[in-house]
Image (cartoon, rainbow, N blue to C red):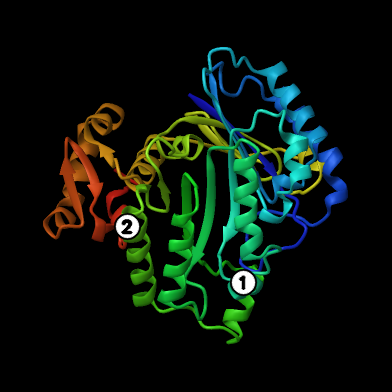
């Protein structure tokens, strides 16, 4: 299985927390789409003929593209890749809730999207205003209703927690509102103050104060418990889904599948190397050479540990031994011993996985299990 990711960097406005590569210069869209199509043809051999099973349009705000833009991209996809062996592809469109109108959904209805991911972030209008989001809570709820009305049965939303002055009660209300809606998937992310983002400047200048660690942990605990009660499975640290609705595309990043990234700043991986395009939000990104990093055995081992341990399935020890040998398997298990003793990790069915309380310390655990010189 392999996947293709398209990065659409355009936004109407910039969110105060965002450090993803994006631009508000929408006039560049048409030329940018043509550049992505050229890149698609130029890199047709990158995945070495593997069947494509997922396609993901992320951003930025992909819902700023028109149906005609998407038609051009899909026509190129079908011309370059053979999809005949892919019985049921997952094709995701990220969208801003206030782009989801009857007119927009009617215009893209003939396109093969079968999964919609909405950047909701909050069901609290004050929090949305603070984040500089374009939509209101009611707009987000209406967007989900419209998606279902137009036949989309696989809807995901993003939520954000750990906002300044966000209370545990307010966060719980967000989770409960989400669980009452007919959605199949939810991704929840703690607010991170990324250097260069406007919110980082407010923090460093003392205009806002970050939420304390104890409250952050309690928010994450409530997230897990309330979504579990509502029938969601936590299949990765930040991702929850109803049974049968795990994000296949995102899962490919964690299970070692290969993927091709198209567009400015998009990343690719084919088992041999990782590469990423330059951060230029117009067609000229294509005239610059991508950065390339050849994967060695240590890097591959570290990637394996970090990505697999993020999932609730954990690290398959037999696969670890097969890919990296007895020495690295022994190293991993040796480093894991203290976390096994104190109940942060467990081995079950020959898989090394985080226990619930280990999730809160996952970064430190992963750091101890990776190695650079062994």
Point out residue 325 in the picture as x, y percentages from the top left corner. 24, 30
Can residue 47 be seen here? The reply is yes
Q: Is residue 278 visible?
A: no
Residue lying furthest bottom? 206
Of circles 1 and 2, the one toward us is 1
Q: Is residue 116 left or right of residue 296?
A: right
Residue 347 spot, x, y in % from top left: 16, 43
Which mark sits nearer the N-terminus, 1 or 2?
Answer: 1
Q: Is residue 336 above or below residue 134?
A: above
The secondary structure type at the circle numbered 1 is helix
Q: Which residue is mark 1?
A: 125
Q: How many marks?
A: 2
Question: Looking at the image, do the residues carrying marks 1 and 2 touch, with CB atoms under 8 Å apart?
Answer: no
Q: Nearer the viewer, residue 297 or 50?
A: 50
Q: CA distance from mark 1 to mark 2?
A: 32 Å
Report the residue at 30% width, 62% height from top.
361
Q: Which residue is mark 2?
A: 362
Furthest toward the front, the residue is: 149
Q: Is residue 52 above or below residue 170?
A: above
């Amino acid at each position: 299985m392999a996947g293709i990711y398209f990065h659409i960097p355009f936004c109407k406005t910039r969110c105060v927390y965002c450090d993803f590569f994006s631009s508000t210069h929408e006039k560049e869209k048409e030329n940018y789409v043509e550049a992505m199509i050229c890149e698609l043809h130029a890199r047709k051999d990158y995945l070495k003929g593997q069947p494509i099973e997922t396609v993901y349009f992320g951003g930025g705000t992909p819902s700023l593209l028109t149906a005609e833009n998407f038609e051009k991209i899909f026509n190129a996809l079908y011309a370059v890749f053979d999809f005949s062996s892919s019985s049921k592809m997952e094709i995701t469109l990220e969208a801003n809730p206030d782009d989801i109108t009857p007119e927009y959904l009617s215009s893209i209805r003939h396109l093969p999207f079968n999964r919609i991911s909405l950047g909701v972030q909050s069901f609290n209008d004050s929090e949305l205003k603070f984040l500089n989001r374009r939509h209101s809570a009611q707009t987000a709820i209406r967007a989900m209703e419209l998606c279902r009305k137009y036949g989309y049965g696989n809807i995901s939303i993003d939520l954000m927690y750990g906002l300044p002055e966000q209370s545990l009660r307010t966060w719980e209300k967000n989770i409960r509102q989400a669980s009452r809606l007919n959605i199949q998937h939810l991704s929840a992310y703690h607010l991170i103050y990324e250097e260069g983002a406007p919110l980082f400047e407010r923090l460093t200048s003392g205009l806002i104060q970050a939420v304390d660690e104890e409250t952050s942990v309690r928010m994450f605990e409530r997230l897990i418990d309330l979504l579990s009660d509502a029938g969601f499975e936590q299949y990765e640290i930040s991702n929850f889904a109803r049974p049968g609705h795990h994000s296949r595309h995102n899962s490919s990043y964690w299970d070692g599948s290969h993927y091709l990234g198209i567009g400015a700043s998009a990343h690719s991986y084919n088992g041999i190397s990782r590469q990423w395009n330059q951060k230029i939000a117009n067609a000229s990104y294509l005239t610059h050479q991508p950065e390339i990093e050849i994967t060695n055995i240590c890097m591959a081992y570290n990637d394996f540990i970090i990505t697999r341990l993020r999932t609730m399935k954990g690290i398959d020890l037999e696969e670890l031994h097969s890919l990296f040998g007895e020495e690295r398997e022994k190293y991993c298990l040796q480093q894991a011993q203290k976390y096994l003793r104190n109940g942060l990790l467990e081995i079950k069915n020959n898989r090394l996985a985080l226990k619930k309380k280990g999730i809160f310390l996952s970064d430190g655990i992963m750091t101890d299990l990776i190695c650079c010189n062994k």
